[in-house]
Amino acid sequence: MPRYLIIGAGPAGLQLSYYLKRAGADYVTLERTEAPGAFFKEFPRHRRLISLNKVHTVEDEPEIKLRWDWNSLLNDSPDLMFPKYSSEYLPGADDLVRYLADFEREHELNVRFMTPVDRIEKIDGRFHVHTPAETYVAECVIVATGWGGPNIPDIPGIELATGYEDMEVEGSAYAGQRVLVIGKGNSAFETAQAILPHAAIVHLASPHGVRLAWHTKHPGDVRGQYGAFLDSYWFKTLHGVLECDINRIWREEDHFKAAITYTLANGEQALLEYDSVIRCTGFTMDRSIFDDSCRPDMAPNGRIPAIRPDWQSANVDGLYFAGTLMQARDFKQASSAFIDGFRYNLRTMTALLAERYESTPLDRQVIPLDHEKLGATMLDRVNWSSALWTQFEYLCDAFVIDRASGQIQHYQDLPEDYAVERFGDQEELFTITLRWGRQNYGDVFAIQRDPTPDMAHESAFLHPVIRSWRHGEKVAERHLLEDLLAVWRNPVRHVEPLYAFLSEQLT
């Protein structure tokens, strides 16, 4: 009977397997297919990832280079880093599949392939995981299955649409057609971009406007490489981005009709005609494997599980989620939905699992109770850590002040909400994260800056933010000025303001 049972051998399942193996833990990973990374064998449909692979940098430090390597899993082998597999800035999905297979094989992870999970139930505090061949019993189950299937909106006639998962990927198949693409995320724009040179008219439709990544700073929102379609909209080519509710879709002879209501036009209605309708509305988690005894609650959007700050199910003790399923607490903010984010989450999760199930204390460093020592440690971390960089506004370093001993306990890479909850009974706590500025800039490429340290809270780009907490309540906050090269060591702009803030808080 393994202590830990991981379901799924995608990037998250492999990363967690690696960490647990390195820790000497008793684990088994179950994978329904014959090889790792089954999702990426099929998606994205047009085989180009949106995860960056910046091979050439001015940095030699491997930790800092990870900030721009969004596909590598964390491990101790220099040859098992994704830039060894592709030099393309936006790499192909097949390269990721090849990389994951090598990662599993080279690290000899305990993955049992061709082992689909039929049902999970919880009996007397243990999970019983049923597969066609046998039943596994485990203390802890970590679900790393990723997306289970398409998210299908409640639109009458939606069954007439071709799903993104089934669409013809050759753009020439839509030559001369009027095409309705339902959705405005990356899969919708990926689809529109592929058929743009061929289709006569392409409309992207959803109730809300386009969320552009350069406005939201979120990598899951629409990326710049799809700008050609947005150009075509404003250059009057009849392609369009429609803010509307689709009331009904039906077929008439050899074409489709769509009745819509515009959401930004005082309820104006229209009847539009298309030759093809493609559903590109994302994916959702599959809950069918869970018995009623351990069926997880879902987050408000109904597509991902609701989780506690430690990535444990909100309502099922001992059930954890890994990978894209661990994004509920930083949804549309940090990068927990992507490899470059959840690889750090999983490193922290491994430590939390060891603390709970192996009685292994959570790692910490001890520094003297001195504001300059504290400030220097904080600056070292934000200038070096790729975890804080990638998991901006989510992962933090926590510093618990113990005046009785004259020491500070330093914990790395914890979710900030977890740190505040865990150390809420402490009289003094500092957290440091990297954060963006406010969202409501009229033009994100023409932002007025104030370079004085006292105006650092107006910084628009990623910059360090230090928070002071007392018994779980935030009592003070200090921003440090943004820097073009992300180096926060200037004596006047960064060091002195930080030291002054810490001295004031510790007095």
Image (cartoon, rainbow, N blue to C red):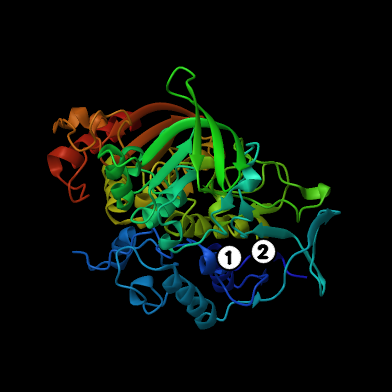
Residue 275 shows in this picture: yes
- Find residue 13 and name its label: 1
- Towards the viewer: 36 or 374: 36
- Asked whether the beta carbons under mark 2 and mark 1 sit within 8 Å of each other, the answer is yes
Query: How far apart are the two marked residues, 2 and 1, measured between alpha carbons?
Result: 7 Å
Is residue 312 rendered to the left or right of residue 432? right
- Say which of 246 and 10 sits in front: 246
Whole-percent x and y of residue 210? Answer: 39, 37
Location of the N terminus by quadrant is bottom right
User: Which amino acid, mark 2?
Assistant: Ile
Q: How many marks?
A: 2
The secondary element bearing badge 1 is classed as helix
User: Which residue is more in the foreground, 40 or 124?
Assistant: 40
* Quadrant containing the C terminus in the rendered view: top left
Q: Nearer the viewer, residue 82 or 357?
A: 82
Tell me what residue is drawn at x 56 percent, y 64 percent: 39
User: Image quadrant of residue 402?
Assistant: top left
Instruction: Residue lying at the far top in this picture: please name it.
Output: 266
Left or right, 484 with respect to 386, comes to left
| Residue hosting label 2 | 7
